[in-house]
Image: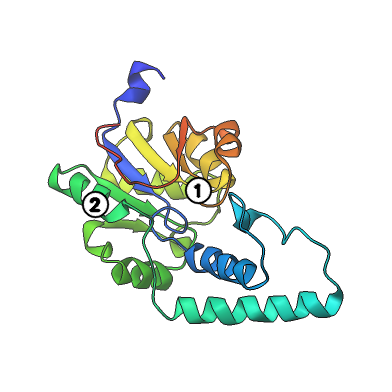
């Protein structure tokens, strides 16, 4: 990492898989389903298949059972990624400029961020309605940086998707990947400087 890259002055977050644990209920539903059929969940079990042959009828029954489990879990509400609220509180206390750059709609972004108590921490939220081009085009991140009045090369991005990592790197931003959607190796290969599982114990400055 060069000295210029190390001087991050602002932080930009993707939303799904970074601030909002959008896969949490799906992972829990898979874990419960595997337990129901006597399969011990391996590491990163939500990325894998059941691991044994099933016929078409059993596959349909398992799929329906998984949907039922997911619906029951989703009724409990939206969950933030672990440690995200505490990390953002720290950034707010230290007056670090912050933005969200998401492919979600304005309505969904406002609703989900409010549900987990994070919306109030962001004056700049760039959504699908604000851009013409989606990731990996860097437009969403360039607009977030412009909204913060911070040069793109002074921004640090947190992303979980490969196209999102590419988008941020395409405008010279540093990227830390979250392994909620892809493996650490995949994120590093895409251009992230490091990969983390969540924000637990994560400290600023980075």
Q: Quadrant of the C terminus?
A: top left
Residue at image coords 26%, 37%? 203
The one of 163 and 199 positioned closer to us in this rendering: 199
Residue that carries the numbered disc 2 in the rendered image: 86
Q: Quadrant of the N terminus?
A: top left
Q: Is residue 41 left or right of residue 59?
A: left
Give the CA separation, mark 1 to mark 2.
19 Å
Label 1 sits on a secondary structure element that is loop
The one of 42 and 182 positioned closer to us in this rendering: 42
Residue 117: where, in percent of width, then height?
Answer: 26, 66
Considering only vertical position in the picture, is 187 above or below 117? above
Front position among marks 1 and 2: 2
Q: Is residue 131 left or right of residue 124?
A: right
Q: Is residue 179 left or right of residue 205?
A: right
Residue that carries the numbered disc 1 in the rendered image: 160
Residue at image coords 66%, 67%? 38
């Amino acid at each position: 990492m060069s000295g210029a890259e190390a001087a991050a002055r602002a932080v930009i977050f993707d939303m799904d898989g970074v601030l909002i644990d959008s896969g949490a209920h799906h992972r829990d539903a898979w874990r419960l389903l595997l337990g129901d059929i006597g399969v011990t969940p391996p590491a990163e079990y939500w990325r894998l298949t059941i691991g044994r042959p099933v016929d078409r009828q059993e596959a349909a029954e398992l799929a329906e059972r998984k949907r039922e489990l997911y619906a029951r879990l989703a009724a409990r509400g939206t969950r933030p990624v672990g440690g995200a609220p505490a990390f953002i509180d720290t950034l707010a206390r230290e007056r670090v400029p912050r933005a969200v750059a998401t492919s979600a709609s304005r309505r969904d972004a406002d609703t989900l961020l409010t549900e987990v108590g994070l919306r109030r921490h962001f004056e700049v939220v760039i959504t699908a309605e604000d851009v013409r081009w989606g990731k990996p085009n860097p437009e969403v991140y360039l607009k977030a940086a412009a909204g913060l009045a911070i040069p793109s090369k002074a921004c640090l991005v947190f992303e979980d998707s490969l196209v999102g990592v590419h988008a941020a790197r395409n405008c010279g931003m540093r990227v830390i990947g979250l392994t909620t959607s892809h493996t650490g190796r995949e994120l590093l290969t895409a251009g992230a400087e490091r990969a983390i599982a969540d924000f637990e114990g994560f400290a600023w400055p980075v």
